Image: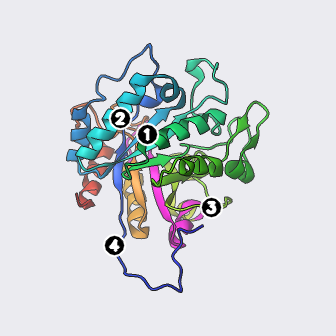
Amino acid sequence: PTDIPDPETTAVVVEKQIYRGVTIPSLDWWQPDWGFNENLTEQSFRLISSWNANIVRIPLNQRSWRLHSEYRQKVGDIVGWSRSLGMEVILDLHAVERGNPDLPYDEVDLHEMPDSLSVDFWSSVALEYKDQNDVWFELFSEPHNDPLQINPDIWLNGGDLGEYAAVGMQELYDTVRAQGAENKVVVNGLNWGFDHSQLQRLDGYNIYYGTHAFGNWPDNDDREEWDAAFGFLADQGYNVIIGSFGHVGVECNNTFHRELIDYAENKGISWVAWAWFPEGCEFPSLIEDWKGTPSPSGEVIREALQKNKK
């Protein structure tokens, strides 16, 4: 990998750019018969910007992008609104098709791994946004082992899962670069995006290694687990971003948010909180309504976003 500085080379030291922001979901579950969430408007992005976010993450539906021009237009609108407000944009491949274009729309979801149609998706997205270097590409939201089993080699190189053929992270990365896109690329680990401990680094550049961490979730809610899963990458000089995090539970627990943000800030790790969507602590939500009233965890995030310089 070429992202690690060469210790033999002397360079001018510049302050590392840290990104801090939020995710606004709903495009990931969009279907043509349902239409768009009525609150997915420029005003919502103005409210996010008013919290001082410098990045916003948009989970996407693979089939909707591939087949529906109105969906691609909405993504374009969101990118335009965000950029005009001084925020960069992460486009996250969230819902995939197990390689089956005839899979019922209700089953287009966060499956174990990307599939052959994901290559088409990223080829198209990269071509669309390759000239906008403030648009990031998150190759796949949460690789995981449920129910099909994914090993580190399949994560990297793809392989036969029995029910469908998985496409690996290296091929998706190469697909983006083949379109001439130099954009930042986010590569998430195993265990629902969390864990890089057993994984190889990709061959490439302008890569952020991503992780998703949730409190009250097995094996990913304390500092020792963070060190083992992704903190070591930051220690080695790689770019790292916590692309989704929160505390899942009927009670809002802000301790997790504070501890994870403190950990990230100390290691120079960027972060994006889940989620700008009013559905309560179990979602978990940063807002209580579409007017942007912060939830208890949202208060913590809004305060932490004040570190951004916009």
- Element type at marker 2? helix
Residue 125 appears in the rendering: yes
Q: Are marks 2 and 1 in contact (CB under 8 Å)?
A: yes
Q: Secondary structure at mark 1?
A: helix
Residue linked to disc 4: 15
Identified by mark 1, the residue type is: Glu
Give the secondary structure at mark 3.
loop
User: Which label's residue is closer to the chain start, 3 or 2?
Assistant: 2
Determine the residue positioned at 51% across, 63% down.
223
Q: Quadrant of residue 166?
A: top right
Q: Label for residue 299?
A: none
Residue kind at label 2, given as amino acid type: Gly
Q: Nearer the viewer, mark 2 or mark 1?
A: 1
Q: Which amino acid type is shown beneath numbered disc 4? A: Glu
Find out whether residue 235 is within the magenta segment: yes
- Mark 3, residue position: 203
Q: Which residue is mark 2?
A: 76
Residue plotted at (37% across, 49% down)? 132
SS at circle 4: loop
| Amino acid type shown at disc 3 | Asp
